[in-house]
Image (cartoon, grey):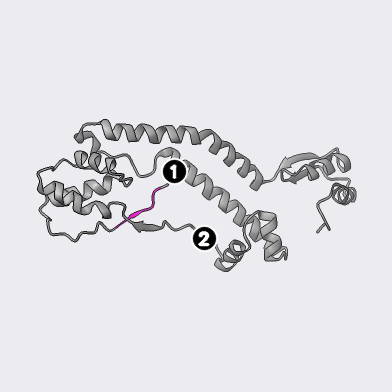
C-alpha cells in the first residue's frame, strides 16, 4: 500500500511497472495526473464501482424530475377521477420508483463487494470505511453478515388510524363512497394511501361494523 494519495507517491510507484497498459482508477484527479506523468502509454479506465456510481448519479438526476411530475399527475388523477376509476389504484411503486430502488441496491452491492475485497487484503475496518465511503459500523455489519445484507422493508403504524372514528361516523351518516371519503380525509390532512381507505370501506360494506378501531400496519412508502 502507498503511504499517501499524493501525485508524487503514486507516480513513483507506477514507474516501477513500465509495462502497464491499463490503469483502473477512481475519479480522483491525483491518480489521473500520476498516471499521465508516470505511465502515459497506459489507457485509463474507471473501476466498476465508480462506473456504477457515476451511472447511478446520472440516472437519478435524469429521473428525479420525471418522478416528481409523475407523482403529482397521479395525485391529481386520483382526486379528479370518478369513483369507479379510483378503485384501480396505481401500484405502490411505479416503474420509475422501482428502477431507482434497484439502482440504489446495485450501488450498495458494488460497495459491499469492494469492502469484502479490501478485507481480504487485510485492511482494517476503518481503512475500508474510508476507501469505500461508508461508516465504520456498516463495514462491521457487512463483515459479520458474511453475505450481502438485503434491506428489510420497515413497517409503521398506518396513517389512517387517527381517522378511523371519522370514517365510521361518515359511514353511519350514509356516506358509502370510498372516493368521497378519501377526498374528505385529504382535506383534513390525511397523507396515507387510498388503498388503506378502500380496504376499510370494503370491510364496512361487507358488514364488519364491529371490527377493532385499528387498521393495522402498512408498508412504508417512498416519498
Q: Is residue 25 above or below residue 209?
A: above
Crowdedness near tag 2: few (<14), some (14–19) or many (≥20) residues, C-alpha within 10 Å: some
Tell me where residue 32 appears, x and y as whole percent. Answer: 79, 41
Residue under circle 2? 149
Specify the farthest residue to the bottom: 144
Q: Which residues are magenta?
A: 217-221
Q: Earlier in the sequence, mark 1 or mark 2?
A: 1
Left or right, 55 with reference to 36: left
Residue at x 38%, y 34% (from the top left corner): 72
SS at mark 2?
A: loop
Q: Is residue 143 above or below residue 168?
A: below
Assign the magenta stretch its main secondary structure: strand
Quadrant where the image shows the N terminus: bottom right
Left or right, 172 with reference to 83: left
Crowdedness near tag 1: few (<14), some (14–19) or many (≥20) residues, C-alpha within 10 Å: few
Residue at x 60%, y 56% (from the top left corner): 112
Contact, mark 1 vs mark 2 (Cβ under 8 Å): no
Does the magenta segment cover residue 219?
yes
Query: Depth check: 119 or 87 in front?
Result: 87
Q: How many marks?
A: 2
Tell me where residue 45 appears, x and y as whole percent. Answer: 73, 40
Does the magenta segment cover residue 67?
no
Displayed quadrant of residue 208 = bottom left
SS at mark 1?
A: helix
Query: Depth check: 41 or 100 in front?
Result: 100
Quadrant where the image shows the C terminus: top left
Tell me where residue 152 appears, x and y as whole percent. Answer: 44, 58
Q: Is residue 50 above or below residue 81?
A: below
Residue at x 54%, y 38% (from the top left corner): 60
Tell me where residue 42 appears, x and y as whole percent. Answer: 82, 40
Residue under circle 1? 98
Amino acid at each position: 500500500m502507498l503511504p499517501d494519495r499524493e501525485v508524487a507517491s503514486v507516480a513513483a510507484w507506477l514507474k516501477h511497472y513500465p509495462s502497464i497498459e491499463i490503469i483502473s482508477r477512481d475519479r480522483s484527479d491525483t491518480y489521473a495526473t500520476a498516471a499521465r506523468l508516470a505511465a502515459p502509454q497506459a489507457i485509463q479506465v474507471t473501476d466498476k464501482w465508480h462506473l456504477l456510481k457515476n451511472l447511478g448519479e446520472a440516472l437519478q438526476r435524469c429521473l428525479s424530475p420525471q418522478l416528481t411530475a409523475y407523482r403529482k399527475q397521479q395525485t391529481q388523477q386520483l382526486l379528479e377521477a370518478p369513483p369507479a376509476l379510483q378503485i384501480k389504484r396505481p401500484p405502490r411503486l411505479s416503474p420509475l420508483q422501482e428502477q431507482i430502488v434497484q439502482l440504489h441496491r446495485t450501488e450498495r452491492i458494488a460497495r459491499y463487494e469492494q469492502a469484502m475485497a479490501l478485507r481480504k487484503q487485510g485492511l482494517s475496518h476503518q481503512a475500508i470505511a474510508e476507501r469505500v465511503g461508508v461508516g465504520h459500523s456498516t463495514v462491521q455489519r457487512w463483515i459479520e453478515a458474511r453475505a450481502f445484507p438485503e434491506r428489510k422493508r420497515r413497517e409503521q403504524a398506518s396513517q389512517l388510524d387517527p381517522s378511523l372514528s371519522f370514517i365510521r361516523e361518515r359511514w353511519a351518516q350514509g356516506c358509502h363512497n370510498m372516493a368521497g371519503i378519501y377526498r374528505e380525509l385529504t382535506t383534513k390532512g390525511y397523507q396515507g394511501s387510498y388503498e388503506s381507505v378502500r380496504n376499510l370501506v370494503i370491510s364496512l360494506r361487507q358488514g364488519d361494523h364491529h371490527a377493532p378501531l385499528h387498521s393495522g400496519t402498512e408498508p412504508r412508502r417512498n416519498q
